[in-house]
Amino acid sequence: MGCLHAWKNQVDIHIPLLEKAQLLLRTFKEKYDPGDHLLPRFSNQKINSYLKEIAELLGINKPLTHKVARKTFGSVLLYYNVPMKVVSKLMGHSSIIITERHYAQVELKKLGMEMDQVALLLSTKINLS
């Protein structure tokens, strides 16, 4: 698995890339000349414009923004049991406390789901006795 080196908050972070992401980067580099960057850099305003266009094409009636996309990415990682420390690194947060604060609701939802599993397990054990 390849690795992407990035800077955020004056910290060098190393992000492992899945094979599909590596392929996309190679393809992009061959077709376009991104210069000093792996991908072209867009302003948040431009990204929001693209996301609005995508939402319209897909019939999504909620506003999509770069912040929503970031928050969704972090939430999906946590939902699929990626450790909070790893999510914090991938999000480029300077502290795990920031990540915990931003994703507290996801953690509470997961806690509820885990307790539902415990209740199911206990009810099954009790019924077997």
Image (cartoon, helix red, strand yellow):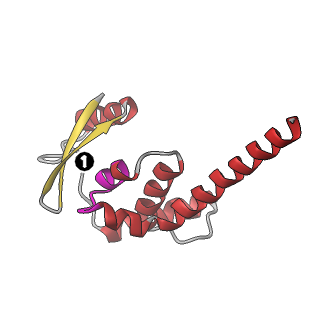
Q: Is residue 6 left or right of residue 46?
A: left
Circle 1: is it few (<14), some (14-19), or many (20+) Cα within 10 Å? Answer: few
x and y percentages locating residue 42 in the rendered image: 27, 61
User: Residue sitting at 43 percent across and 56 percent down?
Assistant: 74
The residue at which mark 1 appears reads as 39
x and y percentages locating residue 59 in the rendered image: 64, 62
Residue lying at the far front of the rendered structure: 129
The amino acid sitting under disc 1 is Leu
User: Residue sitting at 34 percent across and 71 percent down?
Assistant: 45
The answer to if 88 sits in the magenta stretch is: yes
Badge 1 element: loop
The answer to if 2 sits in the magenta stretch is: no
122 and 20: which is toward the camera: 122
Residue range of the region highlighted in magenta in the rendering: 86-95
Residue 16, by quadrant, is top left
User: Residue sitting at 45 percent across and 64 percent down?
Assistant: 103
x and y percentages locating residue 70 in the rendered image: 40, 60
